[in-house]
Image: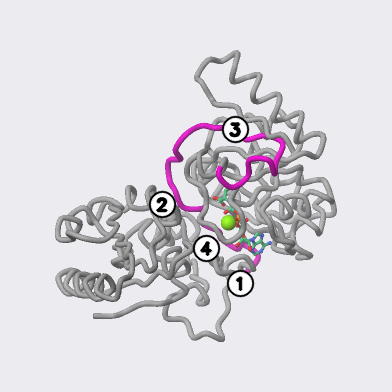
Amino acid sequence: MNTLIKKITGNPEEDNLTISQAAAILKNNGLVAIPTETVYGLGGNAMDEGAAAKIYAAKGRPSDNPLIVHIAKVSDLTLLSDQVPEKAYALAERFWPGPLTMIVRKNKSVPYTVTGGLETVAVRLPSHEVARAVIEASGTFVAAPSANLSGRPSPTDAIHVIEDLDGRVDMIIDDGAIDIGVESTIVDLTEDIPVILRPGYVTKSMLEEVIGEVKLDQGLMASAPSDVKPKAPGMKYRHYAPEAELVIVEGEADKVLDRLLLLTAEGLECGKKVGIMVTSEHAPFFREGEVVILGKAGDNGQIARNLFAALRSFNGKNVDIIYSEAFSEEGIGQAVMNRLVKAAGHRIIKV
Ligand code: TXA
Ligand code: MG
């Protein structure tokens, strides 16, 4: 398949043309990769029974994993659900458009193929202007998972999407690097006490300020027993992973640095090519190895923005093993550590 790749240029005429081309493809049940504020999404027509199968074929995996339906305005929620809880409107008022996905009961119009057979649907109103313009112009809703090949880290720059999906989708819209860098927070509003199924930019305390008590799905925690499975079906897959084995070192900063230096030296001695993911404070201590800096310690926004690109960057470097420090879990840091722990397949050394 020939993939049309169009850059957002800032020139209104050019960009409007790009948006209408994308909208026409979606209307005709084609696939378009679009930028959002979290990560790039691989969009298809959410009202089309066949969209999910096409999307997963492009991602390289047959799947019954439910997709997030992206809408262009808050009132669209009532077109997807006949039972929108009050809390959803309160959250929409505060966080939409933005990086929050809400799970509500679906109505008849939403195909089961899109919800993976569930009676509920995940809905998000993105804040990225291009994403919203494309959804609006398509006259439908857009089902979109992250626009990466299955198993690879989510794409936070158009270059990642092109790497993974050129030739596999009808169109890719290139708006350069993404703002947030980790996927949206998912909150399930079908329970009496809402439950966070995936942490993201919008934290538990931000949600609680608006709707009172919110729980965190126990299956998400690094410490969860292996028989406690996450409730969002997609959270159980090996995800975000670089090709090489990734190991996290967690503990007090000085001890973490010492252990990382030791592990690096040991790895090099055995003839391994070692990758290292650290803060800019720790980076100068490493004289050898492939060092990738995520950001300053405590600058969790920057660390989130760089995480997936950093994981991806090791694939081109042919490293045998990657060691990462554990980063702060404040704010969006919880989402960063959730993704990092998954990428590491829960291999964590505590010091
Ligand atoms: O930021 C984001 O949310 C990005 C951008 C493109 O919007 N999208 C994204 O989609 O991350 P995806 O498919 O990679 O992740 C969707 C997650 C999966 O873990 C899936 O299992 C969960 O949402 N999910 C979707 N519908 C659900 C439902 N009805 N109940 C429970 N979990 C659901
Ligand atoms: Mg994904």
Task: Name the residue nearer the viewer: 109 or 227.
Answer: 227
Instruction: Tell me the amino acid under the disc marked 1.
Output: Lys
Query: Helix, strand, or loop for circle 3?
Result: strand
Task: Name the residue nearer the viewer: 129 or 347.
Answer: 347
Instruction: Tell me the amino acid under the disc marked 4.
Output: Arg
Kindly identify the residue that appears in the image at 57 percent across and 67 percent down.
Answer: 235
Which badge, 1 or 3, comes first in the chain's sequence?
3
Residue corresponding to mark 3: 173
Instruction: Tell me the amino acid under the disc marked 2.
Output: Ser
Q: How far apart are marks 4 and 3 (CA)?
A: 26 Å
Task: Name the residue nearer the viewer: 241 or 76.
Answer: 241
Using the image, determine if residue 128 lies above or below residue 150: above
Query: Helix, strand, or loop for circle 2?
Result: helix
Residue corresponding to mark 2: 313
10 Å crowding of disc 3: few (<14), some (14-19), many (20+): many
Task: Name the residue nearer the viewer: 2 or 48.
Answer: 2
How far from the left and from the top, in percent, is residue 234?
62, 65
